[in-house]
Image: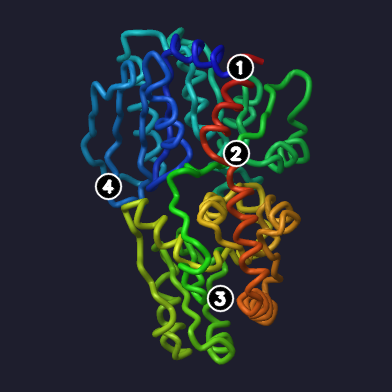
Amino acid sequence: MNEKLLQKLSELNICIVSHIFSSGPALDLEEYLKDKVKSLFFIGHPFPYRSDIRNFYRHYNGGKLTEEHNAREWKLPEALFYLKDALYTFIWALSQKTRINLFIGSDNFSAYLGLILKRMGKVEDVVLYTIDYMPTRFKNPIMNFLYHYFDKTCLKECEVIWNVSQKMAEARQKQKNIGGEGWAPQILVPLGIWHERIPELSFKDKERYRLVFLGHVLEKQGLDIVVDSMPALVKKLSRIKLIILGAGPHESSLKKKAKKLKVKNCVEFKGYIEDHHEVELELAKSSIGIAMYKPDPDSFTYFADPAKLKNYLSAGLPIVLTNVPPIATDLEKEKCAIISRYSKEDFIENISKLLGNTEKLKEYGDNAVHYADKFDWNKVFLKALHQTLLP
């Protein structure tokens, strides 16, 4: 299977188009494909809230980066930002001398642009890589209508739809009766990790009472519950510490709360860390990963496959999380996570029991590493591309 697929890939010109924050599966797909295909053209559109908002592209031939370009910086309203992204996609894709055999758009807007390029004869096949999906994606009704129009068109005209969770296909079927005969096949392509790259520390080398959160610091991440719990946890476990890796609009509010509760000495805000290796080391020396998502029915986490959970697992961290992401019940079944109610009392109880039981803490950490292996990007992308190119 591998040899046939690798031979097929070596003959293809592939284009990936993605909106970019800091990291993400489209960048991991770039890393996976760049030395396996005939040529790879990666177009990146930074989100407007990123510090560097310049559109860019990278071009690889035979595994080597042959061209890289950053566009000028545009300060525009959000709606015009996306129109600018569309313009760059068309200009840069049409500038390619060769026909694009496979166009992979990591959201339905990008994939829709790929379908227009297909109608123009520049692209052969289009894949929609659905990273995020939710019935009410935008509060603005016009934006939400366009979001679902693009999505429905992709389900009609793309070759294959890659979904990071099965819940996405179920939601489309329930909301729009999309799926089955006459529609593009939807396959499961879960988020992964570079499992071999993430450092592992032995149980004795970890900081026993170190909790860690990784991600964008938003209210929906449930960190209020975690910080509210710290005074009681400190009384029970005096050496406990919470490390927050990431930044976001809710960060200042949490800092004020930690100060008010007199726990700022045991809650450390490290902010956004550019170096992925440094992030991985921070995870590896921790003891428990935190993912107390707020149970909000309008949250895309109900349909998503959060990347941080895979990073926790690969670093050997048992996880304490709410039953919001679709993978939560599987993690609990595999004994590498504990599902907590979204309450301070339940969180305190679960953390206290896990940290107080050396045998269970070690067992869940070992299970996490073992379970993470199936999500190594090499395995995830190999399977997805085989289902896409050699069905």
Q: Marks 2/4: CA distance? A: 29 Å
Q: Marks 2/1: CA distance? A: 41 Å
Residue 98 lies in what quarter of the image? top left
Task: Give left or right: position of 55 versus 374.
Answer: left
Expressed as whole percent of the image width and height from the top left, the position of residue 28 reads 44, 36
Expressed as whole percent of the image width and height from the top left, the position of residue 84 reads 34, 33
Q: Nearer the viewer, mark 2 or mark 1?
A: 1
Q: Marks 3/4: CA distance? A: 31 Å
Residue type, mark 1 in image = Met
Q: Is residue 73 above or below residue 331?
A: above
Task: Give left or right: position of 271 versus 180.
Answer: left
Per the image, the residue denoted by label 2 is: 145
Which callout, 4 or 1, points at the residue further toward the start of the chain?
1
Q: Nearer the viewer, residue 226 or 2?
A: 2
Q: Quadrant of the N terminus?
A: top right
Per the image, the residue denoted by label 4 is: 52
Per the image, the residue denoted by label 1 is: 1
Q: Residue at x 61, y 53 (%)?
A: 301
Q: Is residue 135 above or below residue 291?
A: above
Q: Which mark is residue 226?
A: 3
Which callout, 3 or 2, points at the residue further toward the start of the chain?
2
Residue type, mark 2 in image = Phe
Residue 171 lies in what quarter of the image? top right
Q: Nearer the viewer, mark 3 or mark 2?
A: 3
Q: Residue at x 47, y 75 (%)?
A: 242
Expressed as whole percent of the image width and height from the top left, the position of residue 18 reads 43, 34
Neighbours of disc 2 within 10 Å: few (<14), some (14-19), many (20+): some
Expressed as whole percent of the image width and height from the top left, the position of residue 135 reads 66, 45
Which callout, 2 or 1, points at the residue further toward the start of the chain?
1
Q: Nearer the viewer, mark 3 or mark 4?
A: 3
Q: Nearer the viewer, residue 84 or 329?
A: 329
